[in-house]
């Protein structure tokens, strides 16, 4: 029977989460020419910048209001006013996002009032300036990202009372959520195959995975424009591809602009991708093209081809809630038992959704929310798994338990290129099936096409040539 557990310890040990402003910063990178000002101490900008730079391997430009001891006592208004003025005059951005931090929230700075004061003094600055609340003590990077999208949906789209059957702009608003540039490119490719036009809210596929250009453009190429975001109130529908990131914004589009909302599971795996395609068809009337049908068939074939290696294996998955949800379904589709599913996000609803999923697909999983890698490691020690899926922070579990780690999610900082890969859609699922299976195979010895479990080999049964080929296995024996 599946169970839900919530970690009650107040201190996180080896957390899987990042701090809240980083979510708003990431999504701001998806708006062409937009810049973030982090209203806090310099470290609150430096930490997310380093983490993003190590994952995306791109320069990460984020401004800071640079609060100090003095401003912590007397308030950071003057610093923030100066920061907005400097950023505007120096960079002429198309939009500014101001993220609060633990510090500015604790001292109680009223950021919307400071923005109002700035706009009163500088009426010529006609760009949107958004205030996003991102104190890390009330959420994670997921909360920061979601709050940013809600602010975009509230502030940017043109407000015009629309009748139910008024003409639309013929586009779908697509909110990908926390994914990689490679995932966004895959989603765009699927939309192109379906002949569906979309406004991505937002699109950091080029801005955070750009090319080398000389001279370097003032802002990275790509990103959704502010004009496109303003026009998003005229869309046919909004699709949020993550429940925890963008679901609220999709609701705002429905409530304020009469744009129908579809909040779907992240399209990881066969069934979730089917749901995405079926939703696109329901909205636009356009059927699944043959090219996607062929990809779907290839995914099924990949699952069938690998079932003998995967069936009955046990996995542990951790990371962002929607990604974990998608991966658990994919693992079940592959015949793998998802033994542990963990997120740092404090969402009972996620845990209940996971429980419903586990019951639907018939797997027994411990669903751990508001939890950390210390807890996961304890569980894995007590009940070993064959494979771990998650970001780089789980490497120490993988090393200590000699279990392969399939890297997915954010941050991947001990490998390169993962931001360019995709895990969404049929193609993303195929590469995951391959990678997961290969990781499971890497923990075995292949002798004359016969796969033999490492644990089944006694010390005297290891032939010399195998010992030479695989020193780790020899040591284990
Ligand atoms: S103080 Fe808060 S906002 Fe700043 S880096 Fe730390 S967790 Fe993030």
Image (cartoon, grey):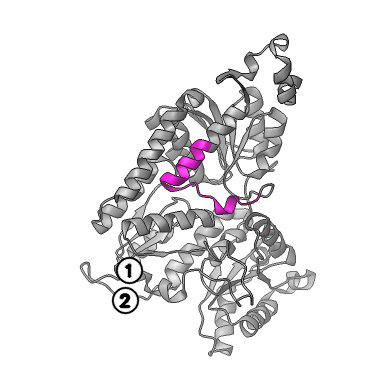
Q: Is residue 187 magenta?
A: no
> CA separation, marks 2 and 1?
7 Å
What range is drawn magenta here? 416-434
Quarter of the rendered image showing ligand 1: bottom right
Name the residue at the right extreme. 69
Mark 2, Cα crowd under 10 Å, few <14 / some 14-19 / many 20+, is few
Q: Is residue 233 above or below residue 177?
A: below
Of the pair 282 and 318, the residue shown nearer to us: 282
Q: Residue at x 27, y 53 (%)?
A: 281
Spot occupied by residue 103 in the image (x, y as percentages of width and height) = 69, 63
Residue 35 rendering spot, x and y as whole percentages: 59, 72
Return the residue at label 1: 257
Residue 121 at x, y percent in the picture: 58, 89
Residue visible at 58% across and 62% down? 208
> Residue drawn at (53%, 25%), measured in percent from left and top?
313
Is residue 81 visible to the viewer in this orientation of the structure? yes
Q: Earlier in the sequence, mark 2 or mark 1?
A: 2
- In the displayed structure, does residue 182 sit left or right of residue 294? right
Residue tagged 2: 160
Near mark 1 (Cα within 10 A), the count class, few <14, some 14-19 or many ≥20, is many
Residue sitting at the far left: 165
Please state which of residues 383 and 119 is positioned toward the viewer in this rendering.
383
């Amino acid at each position: 029977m599946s169970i839900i557990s919530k970690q009650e310890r107040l201190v996180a040990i080896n957390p899987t989460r990042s701090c809240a402003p980083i979510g708003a910063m990431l999504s701001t990178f998806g708006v062409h020419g937009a810049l973030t000002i982090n209203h806090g101490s310099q470290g609150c900008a430096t930490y997310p910048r380093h983490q993003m730079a190590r994952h995306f391997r791109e320069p990460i430009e984020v401004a800071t209001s640079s609060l100090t001891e003095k401003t912590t006592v007397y308030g950071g208004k003057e610093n923030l006013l100066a920061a907005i003025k400097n950023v505007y005059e120096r960079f002429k951005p198309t939009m500014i996002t101001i993220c609060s931090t633990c510090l500015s929230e604790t001292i109680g700075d009223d950021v919307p009032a400071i923005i109002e004061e700035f706009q009163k003094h500088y009426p010529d600055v006609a760009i949107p300036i958004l205030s996003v609340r991102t104190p890390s003590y009330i959420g994670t990077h997921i909360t920061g990202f979601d709050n940013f999208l809600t602010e975009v949906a509230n502030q940017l789209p043109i407000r015009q009372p629309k009748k139910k059957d008024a003409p639309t702009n013929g586009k779908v608003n697509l909110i990908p959520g926390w994914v990689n540039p490679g995932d966004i490119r895959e989603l765009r490719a699927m939309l192109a195959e379906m002949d569906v036009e979309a406004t991505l809210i937002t699109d950091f596929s080029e801005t955070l995975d750009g090319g080398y250009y000389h001279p370097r453009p003032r802002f990275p190429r790509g990103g959704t424009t502010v004009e496109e975001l303003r026009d998003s109130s005229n869309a046919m529908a909004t699709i949020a591809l993550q429940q925890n990131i963008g679901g609220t914004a999709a609701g705002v589009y429905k409530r304020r602009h009469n744009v129908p909302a579809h909040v779907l599971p992240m399209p990881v795996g066969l069934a979730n991708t089917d749901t995405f395609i079926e939703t696109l068809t329901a909205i636009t009337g356009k059927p699944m093209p043959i090219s996607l049908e062929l990809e779907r068939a290839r995914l099924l074939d990949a699952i069938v081809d690998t079932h003998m290696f995967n069936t009955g294996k046990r996995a542990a998955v951790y990371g962002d809630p929607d990604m974990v949800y998608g991966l658990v379904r994919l693992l079940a589709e592959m015949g793998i038992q998802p033994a542990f599913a963990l997120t740092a996000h404090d969402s009972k609803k996620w845990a209940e959704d996971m429980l419903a999923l586990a019951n639907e697909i018939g797997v027994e999983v411990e669903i751990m929310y508001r939890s950390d890698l210390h807890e996961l490691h304890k569980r894995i020690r007590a009940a070993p798994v064959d494979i771990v899926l998650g970001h780089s922070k789980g490497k120490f579990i993988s090393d200590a338990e000699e279990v392969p780690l399939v890297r997915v999610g954010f941050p991947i900082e001990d490998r390169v290129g993962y931001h360019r890969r995709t895990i969404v859609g049929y193609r993303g699922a195929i590469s995951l099936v391959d990678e997961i299976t290969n990781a499971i195979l890497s923990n075995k010895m292949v002798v004359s096409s016969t796969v033999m479990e490492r644990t089944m080999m006694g010390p005297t049964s290891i032939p010399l040539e195998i010992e030479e080929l695989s020193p780790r296995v020899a040591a284990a024996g």
